[in-house]
Amino acid sequence: MPGMSFGKFSLALLLVVTLGWSAEAAPVSAVALHGKPLFSDNFTAFPYVNPNAPKGGKLTLGVLGSYENVNPLIVGGTPASGIREFVIEGLMARSLDEPFTLYGLLAETIDIADDHKSVTFAINPAARFSDGQPVTAEDVLNSFQLLKDKGRPNHRTYFAKVTKAEKIGDRSVRFTFEDASDRELPFILGLMPVFAAHATTPEKFEAASMTPLVGSGPYTVSKIDAGRSIIYQRNPNYWGKDLAVNRGRFNFDEIRFDYYRDASSMFEAFKAGNIDLRLEEDPGRWATGYNIPAVRDGRIIKAEFDIGLPAGMTALVFNTRRPIFADPMVRHALMMLFDFEWCNRTLYNGLYKRTESYFERSYLASTGHPADAYEQKLLAPYPDAVKPEIMAGTYRFPTTDGSGQDRPTQRAAFALLKKAGMVLKDGRMINGKTGQTLSFEILANSNAQEALLLSYARSLAPLGIQARVRLVDSAQYQARLTEFDYDMIQNTWYASLSPGNEQLFRWSEKTADAKGSFNFAGVRNPAADAMIDAMLAANTETDFVSSVRALDRVLLSGDYVVPLFYTPRQWVPYWARLKHPDKTPLFGYSVDTWWTEPK
C-alpha cells in the first residue's frame, strides 16, 4: 500500500538542502535529494490529506497468502502486513508528493557534513515508544547495529558503508561513511526503522517470531491470529499525533488485515463487505467482475487514481544462475515469444500497456531517447554492454498479430535459437553441443499468475520448448525465492523517481548470491554495477537522469527478463462508507489518509 510508512515533521527551522550542499551546511528539518523541499517550516498539513478528517471506525484489508513472522526487518518467514507501516517509525518521514524529500520525525533535524562523509540526527525529545519510554540515541544505535549485522540483506548492504556510528551529546547520533560517493546514503539512514532496545533480545533478533517489536508508531498490535489475521489498535497516547506531517493521517481506530488463500476468495470477501477496500490488479476483473448490485446502487465505488511514479518492471524473470538461461540469445528468443497482444486482448480486456523500460512511464526511461554524451562516457568502458538499437533509443519490443501463433515472430525467434546453437530434434529444442532440452519450470503463487504462465508456455510449445507451470502456496514460494530455487518466476520491481541503493540490491554482483536479495535474475554485470555507482554519486539532476537511463539500457540489453505490462492508473474499489482526500499525491492513493464518517 503506497505511502503508509511515512511520519512526522518538527518545528525546527527549515533550510534548503540539495545535492549541491552549500559550504554552510547546518542542521535542518527537511532535506531533498534533488531540488528543494516543497513545504516550508510553517506548513500545517500535507495538501493530500484532510486535516479535519474524523478519527474512529475500523478498516479491514485483505492479503493473499499467510504469514509466519511479525518482524519485517529479517529474512526468516513471510512477515505480517502493516508492522513497518503502522508500528515502527524511521528517523525521518517521506513526503508522498515529492520524489525523495524527508521531514523530521524521530529526528527533529538532520545535518549532513560539508564533505558528505557523515550525517548527524538530533532525536526529538518528545519522541516516545508505545510503552511510554523515550526514544534515545542508544535505541537508534542499537537498531542500526542489529540491522547491519542481522537484518535483511538490503540493510546489511546499505549500512556496511557506515564506518562509525556514535552518540553525540545527549540526544544525537552521527554516522560516518567510508567515502562520499553515495549521496543517497544519508537519506537511507533517515528512513532507518527504529525500535526499542529495552524490549529487543539481540540473540533472538534473526529468528521468526510472533512477538512484535516495540515501536513508536501510531498503532500497536492488539491481536495476532498467526497466519490468518492481525489487528492494529490506534495508540491514543501516540507522541506524534499533533505533528504537521501527521495531521489528517492514521484516522481509523482499528486496522485489520485478513489473509486469504487465493484471489477469488478474497474478491468474494470484498463483495460480501468483509473487506473495505482493495487495489485491483486484474484487468479482466476490473472490466467485468464489478457488475454487481452494490456497485450499481452506489454502495461500492470504483475509483481510479493517477500515480506519478514510474510503472516499474513487471516481468517473467530468468534465473541466469541456471545453465539453461546462461546464453542471452536464448533469453532474447524466449522474450520474443511472449505474445503481449494476444494476452492483453484475451486475458485482460485490452487494459494493459506494454512495459518497455525498467522505469516505464517516466522521464527516467531510456526508450525513445538516444544516449546523451554523459551516458556514452559512462558506457564507453563497456562497449558490448548495450545493444546499438537500445543505445540509439530506437528499439521496441516485437509486436504480433495477436493470434497467439504469430509466424514471423516464431521464425525470428527460431533463427536466434539456431544462432545460439540450439537445434530442433524430434519435436524438442535441444542444445546442439550438450543435448540438453530447452525445458524449464515457471514457479507461480496465484491462480492469476498461473493463467498467464500457461498461455506463455503454450506459445513456446510450437518451437519444441517445454515450460511447466508449478503453483505453490505463499510460504513455499517465499522460501524458494529466498534460496533462488527456481528457473523462472513472475516478479514486479517497483520504481520511483529517485532510484538509489535499492538498485544495488536488485542488480549488483554482490547480491547475486545473497540469499534474500531481490537480485532474482542473478545479474552479474560490471556495467550495471558501474551505472549504479554513477547514479549514487551524481552531483546534478542531469547527471542523475543520464546515469539512470544508462542503467536502464544495460539491463534491457542483458535480456534478464521478459517484460510484461502495467496499468495506466490505480484501480481501487471501496465501500462507500470510506472517504478519501480530494488530492492524490505523486505516490498515488494512500490508505493512511482515508477515514470513515461517524455513524
Image (cartoon, helix red, strand yellow):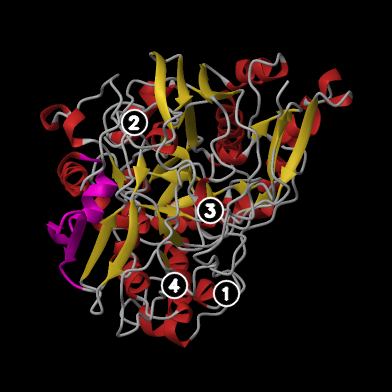
Q: On the image, numbered disc 2 is attached to which residue? A: 130
Asked which secondary structure carries label 1, the reply is loop
Q: Quadrant of residue 73?
A: top left
Indicate whether 345 appears above or below 494. Answer: above
Disc 2 marks a residue whose amino acid type is: Ser
- Which amino acid, by three-letter code, is at mark 3? Gly
Q: Nearer the viewer, mark 3 or mark 2?
A: 2
Horizontal side, residue 546 vs residue 174: left or right? right
Q: Are marks 3 and 4 in contact (CB under 8 Å)?
A: no
Mark 4 or mark 2, earlier in chain:
2
Query: For residue 159, which quarter of the picture?
Result: bottom left
Do labels 4 and 1 touch, CB within 8 Å? no
Few, some or many residues within 10 Å of mark 3 (<14, 14–19, 20+): many
Magenta extent: 151-179
Residue at the limit of the structure toward the bottom, as seen here: 373
Q: Is residue 172 visible?
A: yes
Q: Earlier in the sequence, mark 3 or mark 2?
A: 2
Q: Spatial distance from mark 4 to mark 2, Cα to Cα? A: 45 Å
The x and y percentages for residue 163 are 12, 61
How dense is the environment of label 2, judged by Cα within 10 Å: few (below 14), some, or many (20 and up)? many
Q: Secondary structure at mark 4?
A: helix
Residue 46 versus residue 12: which sits nearer the camera?
12
Mark 4 and mark 1: Cα distance apart in space: 11 Å
Q: Is residue 581 above or below residue 576?
A: below
Crowd band around label 1 with a 10 angstrom C-alpha radius: few (<14), some (14–19), many (20+): some
Numbered disc in front, either 1 or 2: 2
Tell me the CA gap for discs 3 and 4. Answer: 16 Å
Work out whether residue 493 or residue 43 is closer to the camera in this orientation and state it.
43
Task: Indicate which disc, 3 or 4, sits on the residue closer to the N terminus.
Answer: 3
Mark 4 residue type:
Ala
Answer whether residue 366 is magenta in the image: no
